[in-house]
Every structure is written in structure tokens, then in C-alpha cells.
């Protein structure tokens, strides 16, 4: 067995933070500090290299340029390593895992994103276990064909490995901070790492990594609530330069049936704006034709995002508009799964 070669990309986040002795706030710190606190990594017989963001960031500062930097690092080093571990803050981790899932077309190697709720220097930290497990997952091989066990972007956190474009942060306190309500776990981590082989992506062999670097930020999110009024809705739908809207609707994809609402939506679609419907519910799918209210949205030209997370829907739109193709191509690709991000009903 050859020694696994893993590249760690350290972006920041709580895992590498230390407490300011005066203000008591946590701020990102360098990679050397992080590794000094995990001497056990040396017990893994792996060849491990690292690349750090300079400076490391709190993930609430994450933006598309950071995603491009991560994707470029993976692209440049793709042939030199068996797998990649990205250390990242939890706050926007699910956006990053979704963005990378869409950007890294043809990915055949593991990109495992992890972080922690408590800094690595704290006695009860979850960071040490998460880092070591992420490295082991990135190095794992599938005995059936000798290839990598994971061939996609995934989030490893505490007891679970989730598909990157299916996960969301669900707890600010719990060590099990991430969930994927509409797609099964890729692995359960207990005494061992128990992979859920049926759920793991098995892309067609022979594909080459082709990174889509361009992302278009001309999109927004509209969250419905019973007090939303026409002025606000029209204002949002007239945001200068806007090309796409992720609309977070009620239940199975429902929205007000009031004429002012549907008129504003129709007007936006007539102006070429693409509107994608995802549900505010934490699990389940948009079933656009189940109720009159959902049916009216479909008739107005709103697309179903089925069971996509908000993180997947927004990043998918950014990547598709980033291709610079005609709006009708964006519409076609929004309606079909690209990397296992949704289940079409
Ligand atoms: N604010 C931190 C971050 O996202 C939280 C964390 O890492 O858990 O960078």
C-alpha cells in the first residue's frame, strides 16, 4: 500500500482560533498553532502537506474569491494528492461545500470539509477528532475498485459525513452541527467509519477535473413571510442588475395567491429574471402542483428547486449564470441535478 498523500487547505474558522486574553473574543490563528495541538496526526502514516489562507478568516467573511482560491488550489494540486481536507469555519461551511460541488466538475477525488465548534487548543475540543477523521476519510479506498472511497465534496462533522451540496448548519451549540435532511449520510462515524456505499457518488470513470471559476453574484434570496408587502417585493425584484432569485416559499412550495404578488412575479419573469422555488421547511420537497398557490407560481414561470437546500440553490445559480450562457440554458440546468444536489419528483 502506498502512503496516502493529503493536502490540507486551512482557511480559518473556530478550529484554528485562539481567545484574546483581554476581550475574550475568538480570532483566527495560524496553521502551525493548529498542528501543534494535534500531535496525533503524526500517528497516521500519511504524507500531509498544507496550504493556508493568508490571513486565515472567520467564515462569515467568506466570498466567491475565497471559493475561487480553494478551487484553484485543488486544481493545481489535483494530480499530486489522493485527497484534500479543507479546514473551514462552520458558519458558511455549507455554502462553500455547495459552491465547490458545482465548481469542481468531473471531481473524482475526496474533498472533505471540516472544522469545529470549540477551538483546537481547548481541552474539550471537537477539532482534533474532526481533523483526524477527515484525514482518514480523505485517505480511504474502495476495496471494490481500488479508487477513492469518496469522489465528491463532503462535510465531515462529529458523527457524520454528509454530501456537500446537501448539508446545512443546524446548530450553533451541538458538536453534530450539520444535517442533510433530504439525503442519507455518506458515513456514520462511531468506533469505525461506516460508509454508506449506496449513497456515495460514483461518477463515470475517466472524467477530467474541469473547474468552473466564474461565479455570477447577480442573484438574491427572497424569504416569504405573511407581512411581505407589494412595495418590498417589487423593490427586491427590481434590484439593479439582478438575474436570478431564490424564493423561499412555504411548505410544499406555496406563496400568496393575491393578484399583486403574482403580477410582481410575472413581471420579473417577463423581464428575464429567473425565479427558483425552494421550501423554508427543513426537510421535504417543493411539490409545485399540490396546492393552487404553488400551481399559480408554476404557471407564472417559477422553477421548482425540489428538495434543494438554500445553500445549494444560491451557489448553483451563481455557477450557472457564471457560465455566461443564455438564460434558457440556465433554466434547463437549474431543473436537473448536476452533482446530486436534488431529487427531481
Ligand atoms: N464564526 C466561526 C466561523 O464560521 C464559527 C465556527 O467556525 O464554528 O468561522
Image: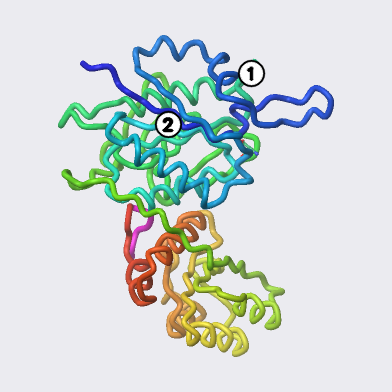
Distance from disc 2 to disc 1, alpha carbons, whole Å, reads: 19 Å
Numbered mark located on residue 121 in the image: 1
Q: Label 1: few (<14), some or many (≥20) within 10 Å?
A: many
Residue 43 appears left or right of 95 = left
**Residue 288, visible in the rendered structure:** yes
Asked if labels 1 and 2 touch by Cβ distance under 8 angstroms, the answer is no
Res 343 → quadrant: bottom left
Q: Which residues are magenta?
A: 340-345
Residue 279's spot in the image, x, y percent? 51, 64
**Residue 170 forms part of the magenta stretch:** no
Within 8 Å: ligand 1 and the Cβ of disc 1?
no
**Residue 180, visible in the rendered structure:** no
Numbered mark located on residue 85 in the image: 2
Residue 273's spot in the image, x, y percent? 49, 78
Above/below status of 118 relative to 237: above
Majority secondary structure of the magenta segment? loop
Q: Earlier in the sequence, mark 2 or mark 1?
A: 2
Residue at image x 45%, y 21%? 132
Specify the quadrant that holds the C terminus. bottom left
Numbered mark located on residue 60 in the image: none
Residue 99's spot in the image, x, y percent? 45, 51
Q: Quadrant of ligand 1?
A: top right
Residue at image x 18%, y 28%? 146
Specify the quadrant that holds the N terminus. top left
Above/below status of 255 relative to 320: below
Report the number of numbered marks. 2
Residue 143's spot in the image, x, y percent? 19, 26
Amino acid at each position: 500500500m502506498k502512503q496516502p498523500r493529503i493536502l490540507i487547505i486551512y482557511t480559518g474558522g473556530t478550529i484554528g482560533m485562539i481567545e484574546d486574553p483581554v476581550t475574550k473574543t475568538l480570532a483566527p490563528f495560524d496553521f502551525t498553532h493548529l498542528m501543534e495541538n494535534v500531535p496525533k496526526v503524526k500517528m497516521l502514516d500519511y504524507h500531509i502537506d498544507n496550504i493556508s489562507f493568508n490571513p486565515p478568516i472567520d467564515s462569515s467573511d467568506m466570498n466567491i474569491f475565497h471559493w475561487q482560491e480553494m478551487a484553484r488550489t485543488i486544481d493545481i494540486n489535483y494530480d499530486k494528492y489522493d485527497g484534500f481536507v479543507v479546514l473551514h469555519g462552520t458558519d458558511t461551511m455549507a455554502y462553500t461545500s455547495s459552491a465547490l460541488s458545482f465548481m469542481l466538475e468531473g471531481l473524482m477525488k475526496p474533498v472533505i470539509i471540516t472544522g469545529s465548534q470549540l477551538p483546537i487548543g481547548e481541552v474539550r475540543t471537537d477539532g482534533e477528532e474532526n481533523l483526524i477523521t477527515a484525514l482518514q476519510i480523505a485517505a480511504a479506498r474502495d476495496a471494490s475498485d481500488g479508487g477513492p472511497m469518496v469522489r465528491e465534496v463532503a462535510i465531515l462533522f462529529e458523527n457524520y459525513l454528509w454530501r456537500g451540496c446537501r448539508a446545512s448548519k443546524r446548530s450553533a451549540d451541538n458538536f453534530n452541527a450539520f444535517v442533510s435532511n433530504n439525503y442519507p449520510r455518506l458515513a456514520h462515524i462511531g468506533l469505525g467509519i461506516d460508509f454508506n456505499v449506496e449513497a456515495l457518488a460514483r461518477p463515470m470513470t475517466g472524467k477530467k477535473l474541469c473547474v468552473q471559476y466564474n461565479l455570477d453574484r447577480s442573484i438574491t434570496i427572497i424569504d416569504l413571510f405573511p407581512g411581505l408587502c407589494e412595495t418590498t417585493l417589487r423593490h427586491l425584484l427590481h434590484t439593479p442588475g439582478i438575474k436570478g432569485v431564490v424564493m423561499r416559499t412555504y411548505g410544499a412550495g406555496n406563496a400568496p395567491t393575491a393578484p399583486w404578488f403574482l403580477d410582481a412575479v410575472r413581471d420579473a419573469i417577463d423581464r428575464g429574471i429567473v425565479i427558483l422555488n425552494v421550501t423554508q421547511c427543513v426537510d421535504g420537497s417543493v411539490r409545485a402542483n399540490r396546492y393552487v398557490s404553488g400551481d399559480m407560481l408554476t404557471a407564472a414561470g417559477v422553477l421548482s428547486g425540489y428538495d434543494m437546500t438554500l445553500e445549494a440553490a444560491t451557489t448553483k445559480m451563481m455557477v450557472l449564470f457564471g457560465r455566461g450562457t443564455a438564460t434558457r440554458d440556465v433554466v434547463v440546468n437549474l431543473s436537473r441535478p448536476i452533482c446530486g444536489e436534488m431529487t427531481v419528483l
